[in-house]
Amino acid sequence: MEHVQLVGLAIIVSILIGVPLGVYLTTNEYLAESVLQIFSIIMTIPSIALFGVMIPILSTIGQGIGFLPAFIALVLYSQLPIIRNTYTGINEVDPNIRDAAKGLGMTTLQRLIKVEIPNAMPLIMAGVRTATVLNIGVGAIAAYIGAGGLGSLINQGISRSNTTMVLVGAVVVSILAIVVDQLLRYFEKRFTPKGI
Amino acid sequence: MLEFKNVSKIYNGNKKAVDHVNFNVDEGELVVLLGPSGCGKTTLLRMVNQLESITEGDIHLNNKSVKESNKIEMRRKIGYVIQSNGLFPNMTIEKNVMIVPDLLGWDRKKQLDRFNYLMELIGLHPDEYRKRYPHELSGGQQQRVGVARALAADPPVMLMDEPFGALDPIIRTKIQDEFLQIQKEIKKTILFVSHDIDEAVKMGDKIALFRDGQLQQYNHPFEILHRPANEFVSEFVGQDRVLKSTSLYSVKDLVDSVSLTGYQKAGSVQTVQEDTSLRIVISKLLNQEAEQLAVEDTKGKIKGILTLDLVEKFLYKQIKETPKRTG
Ligand SMILES: Nc1ncnc2c1ncn2[C@@H]1O[C@H](COP(=O)(O)OP(=O)(O)O)[C@@H](O)[C@H]1O
Ligand SMILES: [Mg+2]
């Protein structure tokens, strides 16, 4: 299914960018503020407007409509929840725990991998979940720029004044969002170390 | 073993937390860093393992400046215990305890043996706790595990920052006793932070008493209690310093120094063991639980009768006759 493919791929790439970036920002408070601000602003751009901006830019490489602009938009929207939750999660690890890790002789990287990321896991996963649900919604709008998926069903319904089609599209999008959210909740439990 | 040479710490260019501190700690000694909150104990401790930088002066560990040592390697050779235990919530007890051996690359078998040994040492059953997580343990158990973790790679030096400070009084007393027992076996060089004079007297081979970052007196607990170096020290140890000093002695010390009253088999009389602290003896006598106590040796044989008069005589003798010791 196009919709699931689009959202799934966008989330994977978003995690690969957002988590390391969030982790890095914990070492640079100054930069952190600016980066979070930028992605907050991106969040406020309506998705239609964002697509509109991308069409002329991407047209220069012949990808003005279709998969690529939709994909980029989804990745951009995902960054705020993922980066912010990673950043907050790591920063909020109990300072005593961090101090103990340091005092026992862990290197910065060992601390991150063995202590900080595992303890920040619930928040990081919550960020991923928010981003995913958000992307399922935005992904439907991407049909306007020809990215296919469930959005096209709704689009066609609207242009043909076919209420049933619109409803079916909307309901399926909602169900997809709910199912994926539950699935991610399950993964969140699985990936969160037992002791937390 | 551990030498503080004119050590000072200035935070943010103005706050002087540690002020020209000089003293040495011998191998196998437990030194208590004592003083009111904010006097710089934690700062001094954290300069040893370089969690804080040294503004001025130097600290030598085994004749080597800690400033010049590789921080990571050095910390793995220094046990570190903090008040809030700092156990990693995401790791099992076994993983927590074995963290340093793991970093050092010990093999599985060696780690297993060490874990079992350490858990026995702190009085927790290895197999019962191996797979548990810190939050499933009581505060006292967590603190014991914190001690085991610090001891894991058998470091010669331990830094302990108010390790039992967050525990309720009954558990605290118990863990203090246990730890003294452990220390008898392991003989580590230990810096132990406390703000509690009673704890310091009980735990310390020596006490370093601080005020506003400055070392006021560094000596055996007996000297601190009976020969305070200045007004501040005598105020800090309190009016009841003679009473406090009683926890330095056991019944055996008294028996060795003054002769007990003879014992006649007449009626029932409460008994005390030779290893009982004199402090407990006094409180029993003063509580009117008994006017006299029969001293029992390890074989259960009664050696004689102990009364308040004898305790008084003993303490007087200690204060007058003990030669002055220096730190
Ligand atoms: N990171 C820090 N930055 C600035 N001042 C500090 C810092 N840590 C401690 N201090 C100050 O240094 C003094 C000594 O603190 P500390 O060593 O924690 O004392 P103690 O452990 O004896 O209570 C206190 O006045 C405290 O406010
Ligand atoms: Mg302190």
Image (spheres, rainbow, N blue to C red):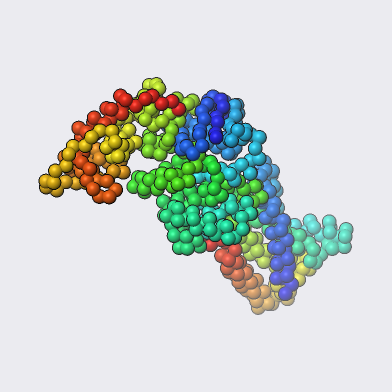
At 47% from the left edge and 37% from the top edge, which residue is drawn? Answer: B29
Corner quadrant of residue A151: bottom right
Residue B62: image location, x then y, percent: 59, 35
Residue for point 25% across, 33% down:
B258
Residue A174 position within the rendered picture, expressed as x and y whole percent measured from the top left: 62, 70
Q: In the rendered image, is residue B222 in sight?
A: yes
Q: Position of residue B72 (x, y in %)?
A: 63, 44
Res. B290 image quadrant: top left
In the drawing, does residue B151 fall left or right of residue B257?
A: right
Is the residue A52 above or below the residue B182 in the image?
A: below
The image position of residue A191, as x and y in percent, is 60, 63
Residue at 38% x, 27% y is B223
Q: Nearer the viewer, residue B317 or A86?
A: B317
Query: Which residue appears farthest toward the left when viewing the image?
Result: B266
* B99 sits to left or right of A45: left
Q: Quadrant of the N terminus of chain B?
A: top right
State the residue in front, B266 or A168. Answer: B266
Q: Is residue B36 above or below residue A194?
A: above
Give the quadrant of the C terminus of chain B.
top left
Q: How many marks?
A: 0
Question: Which residue corresponds to the image point at 46% horizontal and 35% vertical from the top-left?
Answer: B31
